[in-house]
Amino acid sequence: MARQARPRAAVAPGHDSALSEPRPELERYYQTLFSALGPQRWWPARTPFEVIVGAILTQNTAWTNVERAITNLRREGLLSPAALERVERRRLERLIRSSGYFRQKAKKLKEFVRFLRRDFGGSLNRMFRTPTDELRARLLAVHGIGRETADSILLYAGGHRVFVVDAYTHRILARHGLAGSNSNYEEIRALFESSLPPDPATYNEFHGLIVNVGKNWCRTREPRCHECPLQPFLPSTDADRPEGATT
Ligand code: SF4
């Protein structure tokens, strides 16, 4: 039965001092999750371009909805930059309808392939040869590409050393007192990047492991801490445990 306990008040509102120093224990979180859950093989895609399409389509929707859209695009021979740029917008909208917000997402896909052609001659290899910080800034300037999408593209399609932060990441860190509820994306990204070895393969696997924990144990309501591989890392006092945690 769920215990009622107060969530940890990690930091005071405003400046997030919890994130100003590296946290070496994050490497132990990674080792523990990898030992418990094994390789996650995330991102589920056949090509770097498919990663990019998936990263755009997965905004605000579950991955299962994206899979149907990608299957449609593959069946129609549209999983290439040139084909996506050529396809008529209405047809594209119909094919990706399952991913939700399909009109906006069709526009975003079109904007990305236009950017790729205009700035890099349509070549993903050329694009990914750009230094990380410069490419990140250029991706963020494309309509519809926010931080999580840009970093997913950089890490999972391009092998750049950038940690991807999502809602699961934020929730887990907050519940463990490593971030505050007001911590922002860049603070959390910098925390991971300063605390872990500079290795894209580790970043790749760790994000996949976090997604697994978020889906299976660290739910919004009633986290299943008693079964979770990260349970040993929870704050030790009742007052510090996440609300609804079962231990
Ligand atoms: S479910 Fe509990 S132990 Fe697991 S990550 Fe969330 S807060 Fe931590």
Image (tube, rainbow, N blue to C red):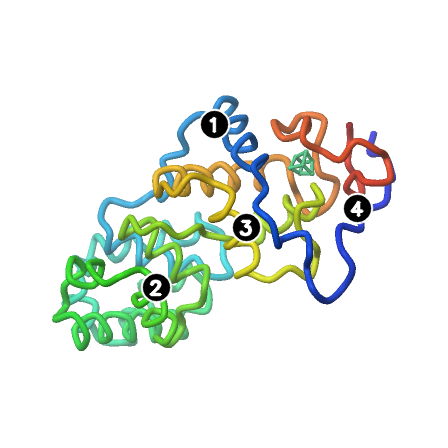
Please tell me which of labels 2 and 3 falls first in the chain.
Answer: 2
Kind of residue indicated by mark 2: Asp
Label 2 residue near ligand 1, CB within 8 Å = no
Kind of residue indicated by mark 3: Leu
Report the residue marked by disc 3: 191
Q: Where on the picture, by quarter, is residue 151? A: bottom left
Please tell me which of labels 1 and 2 falls first in the chain.
Answer: 1
Please tell me which of labels 1 and 4 falls first in the chain.
Answer: 4
Give the crowd class for mark 3: few <14, some 14-19, many >=20 residues within 10 Å.
Answer: many
Secondary structure beneath disc 3?
helix
Cα gap from disc 2 to disc 3, whole angstroms: 17 Å
Q: In the orientation shown, which residue stands out farthest toward the front?
A: 21
The tag on residue 62 is none
Cα gap from disc 3 to disc 1, whole angstroms: 20 Å
| Location of residue 238 in the rendering, given as x and y in whole percent from the top left corner | 86, 35
Report the residue marked by disc 1: 34
From the viewer's perspective, is residue 1 above or below residue 241?
A: above
- Whether residues under marks 2 and 3 lie with C-beta atoms below 8 angstroms apart, the answer is no
Report the residue marked by disc 2: 133
* Residue located at (51% from left, 54% from top): 190
